Image (tube, grey):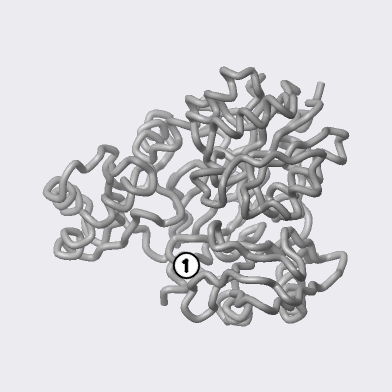
Amino acid sequence: MLFKKVLIANRGEIALRIIRTCKRLGIETAAIYSEADKEAPHTKAATEAYLVGKSRVNESYLNIDKIIEAAKESKADAIHPGYGLLSENSIFAERCRKENLTFIGPPPSVIAKMGSKIEARKAMEKAHIPVVPGVSESQSDVHSACLAARRIGFPVMLKASAGGGGIGMQLVHSEEELIKAYEGNKKRAADFFGDGSMYIEKVIENARHIEIQILADHFGNAVHLFERDCSVQRRHQKVIEEAPSPFVDDDLRTRIGETAVKAARSIGYTNAGTIEFLVDQDKNFYFLEMNTRLQVEHPVTEEITGMDLVEQQLKVAAGEKLTLSQRDIKRSGHAIEVRIYAEDPNTFYPSPGKITSFSLLKHPAVRHECAVAAGSTVSPFYDPMIAKMIVKGTSRNQAIEQLKTALREYHVEGIKTNIPFLEKIVHSEPFQKGEVTTDFLKK
């Protein structure tokens, strides 16, 4: 039996996205909001809404006590964390369990294990999943980091074990660069994640960032929903994602998909998750990390498979079996997602403020996931992503042409956005030919 009411421990477009599926399934929703988000669209779209604190994220959307209190007051029987914020916080997931609230995600122990990139590497090595060459131990000081880098061979990637979004991560080409980078990245990791553990991986040059969407239930069933290509990145953060990948052939698709399912099963994973890989020019692939949540880019997978991933999450969390086997899952067409940020396209600095005009292309092949409109105020307190746009075509070329038109017709005034930057990428020859690797934007 599905839930009667779900509290959504998130904000913005992902909160609206979850509310939409819950409404379709007849599930009531409870939203949470900060003082800055009092008039935000997600508070009006939900069945009811609860104030959980002041504007700063650590006083509201990261306030576990307040969120649990809101869930109890609303009489919700489950909590969906969305992505970001508390979605990969094992302490929050465990607290939900203790309060008899179903956490819509994997078990707390799995979140904790995959949340440490060092522990994740060890788990994958144990399961005989190929990992990026490197060390699976924390480098306690710069001397041990230098010794490890010498063994691996430069260039290497210095990475925070608890990191995400590129924080605490730096490409280094020499021992001198590593010495300069070590303490600063260690401090950033400790400040942002409460854990300054660092480790070293070999740089896979000219790599593709390919991730596999998986679903797993509580009965040992697990499937993959093919791949997403997330190689267009700025400072290790994804900018454009697409499915299927223009680089992946049928043989690689089968091998990497089966490996992702094997990896998920090896750690007792349940619910929706994503296994991320780096793939070299010879189509060798290496485990990078696992995201134990719904991904920002999940709509491209939904568009090519026709599946509602939030619905699948709800059903698995409610104890239902997966109804599809791997051979039942088909893909059709090509989908591309772009992330719309309130930021200066030249400096990439956030551009908060009031949106004075807002209009989008309305077309059956274009899907908008956004939580702003004319009159909305973009707050400086939260991530500057204000929307996502997803286009679908029968082919990649058709999807690209549709994307060009949709970007041209996307009008936002009152703030700056990254739309001019996205248009440059989409019109570039490497992107149109499907030849983009993770260092494309840097080059």
Quarter of the rendering containing residue 130: top left
Residue 295's spot in the image, x, y percent? Answer: 61, 48
How many numbered discs, if any? 1
Residue 34 vs 362, above or below: the answer is above
Quarter of the rendering containing residue 204: bottom left
Residue 185's spot in the image, x, y percent? Answer: 28, 55
CA neighbours of label 1 inside 10 A, class few (<14), some (14 to 19), many (20+): some
Instruction: Tell me if 111 is positioned left or right of 251 in this view.
Output: left
Residue 352 vs 165, above or below: the answer is below
Instruction: Tell me if 402 is positioned left or right of 107 in this view.
Output: right
Q: Residue at x 58, y 20 (%)?
A: 97
Helix, strand or loop at label 1? It is strand
Q: Quadrant of the C terminus?
A: bottom left
Q: Is residue 214 visible?
A: no
Q: Quadrant of the N terminus?
A: top right
Residue 141's spot in the image, x, y percent? Answer: 16, 45
Residue 345's spot in the image, x, y percent? Answer: 54, 78
Q: Is residue 244 visible?
A: yes
Q: Residue at x 39, y 37 (%)?
A: 116
Q: Nearer the viewer, residue 306 or 330?
A: 306
Q: Residue at x 34, y 56 (%)?
A: 169
Residue holding disc 1:
234
Q: Nearer the viewer, residue 324 or 167?
A: 167
Q: Nearer the viewer, residue 66 or 110?
A: 66
**Which amino acid type is marked by label 1?**
Arg
Instruction: Tell me if 159 is positioned left or right of 411 in this view.
Output: left
Q: Residue at x 58, y 33 (%)?
A: 66
Residue 288 vs 378, above or below: the answer is above
Q: Nearer the viewer, residue 19 or 72?
A: 72
